[in-house]
Image (tube, rainbow, N blue to C red):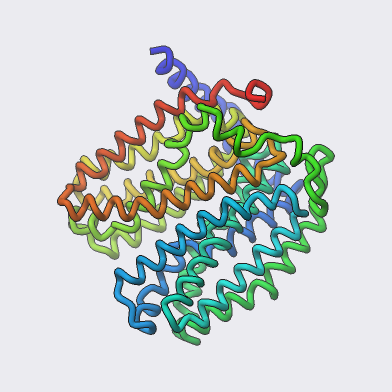
Amino acid sequence: MAKLRYNSGFIHAVVNSLRLQGFSLTLYLDFIRRSWPLLCFGFVSIFWGNFGQSFFVSWYGAHIQESLGLSAAVYGSLYSAGTLASAITIMTVGGYIDRWPLQRFAAAVGAGLMLACLVMVASYHALTLLLGFYLLRLCGQGLLPHTAQTTMARYFDADRGKALSLSASGVPVGEVILPLLAVALIAAVGWRGSWLVFAASVPLLYLPLILFFLRRAPQDTNTPPIQQANTHHASSKGRRYMLGDYRFWLALPAVLAAPFIVTGVFIQQGFILSAKSWDPLWLASCFIMYGVAHWLASLLAGVLVDLFSARRLLPVMHLSLIAALAVLALCEGQWVAPVFMILLGSSIGVVGPITGSLWAEVYGTGKLGSLRSLMTAFMVLSTAISPVLFGALIDAGITVRDLFGSCAIGAVAASILVAFSYPRATVDQLG
């Protein structure tokens, strides 16, 4: 009962604060005017990282399978294997952002993305394709967002939530622009030629842009110099400390719940379409609502994180995810699709700034890259497992009601566990 009173009182405080202060674009515009170089660095890094995201690579699946003569099962296995290998590698190389100057690390990751695109151009064999998938997932899905979000969390304190939200806008912008660009380039120069264009975009656009932004970024004396190595690294607590903290294990299910469930939903959307008798075009149109909700919820969550801290928001983080899964499991009709997609987009938008700020709040920023790379690896592994698990349950005859009702119950359980993890912990209390 005490926990229920805490949650209801906290939600009331959130509503009152937003009513008094107003969720105005002024908050973001003032912040952007002060910090635009580093925010732009984060945005373009995440935008270019979209080349390794599943939503983008999926547009090439049919073309690649036809060109290489691969079955859907073999193609999917190569993609999963590349994803899993990238997750293991991220744990090793992601921590170098704590030791190297930021511009050197970002440039190295950008060069890796360019190499990934060139390998895709040269993929005439399954093994070459596997290497291309590995590099795309490592640099695109993993290290470029890791670079951006680690930088936002490290170099911003009072405005950390807004910084994470603004840089993460590179994902919804990419979701709108890049599929159209891919389709146009495939029609004009073929699928291999389109990857050559993307490879060229790294030295011609991405690298000059990040160097331009980083050279103009204002420097806070409390953070490591942008163009020098991180001198705070050696004295900070790292992975061993975090893994030995029981609070981390209480929080982990909640941190991974949204990417795990949402990936399973998207990969198995054919099962949902069949069970709900939805037209594919209808669901596709609802993705626009998903993207808008994702973006707006992320901006709102950024303000809330700065007002209340990520630790206090953890217990209520999955309210929209639970609502989305409940609607999908229990309701029927065409109206369910847009409501479900709006709630699902809101859940992903809220989770990003909260979990992105959490590790800096609790463990500090000295070894933040090492900590975030470990969490990125956990996230990538969870997104590799969920499609397989969902597929096995679907093949065994599970219904939409049972599958997503169980997911909702799991999200509730994760929210209960996380309520006993970090909400009252601070860096000083843990250190």
431 w.r.t. 60: above or below: above
Q: Is residue 129 left or right of residue 105?
A: left
Q: Position of residue 124 (x, y in %)?
A: 45, 84
**Frontmost residue, 351 versus 332:** 351
**Frontmost residue, 344 versus 200:** 200
Q: Residue furthest left?
A: 397
Q: Position of residue 76 (x, y in %)?
A: 35, 66
Q: Position of residue 315 (x, y in %)?
A: 46, 28
Q: Is residue 305 left or right of residue 6?
A: right
Residue ID at (33%, 78%): 70
Residue ID at (26%, 48%): 336
Residue 410, quarter of the rendered image = top left
Residue 414, quarter of the rendered image = top left
**Frontmost residue, 393 versus 200:** 393
Residue 256, quarter of the rendered image = top left
- Which quadrant is home to the C terminus? top right
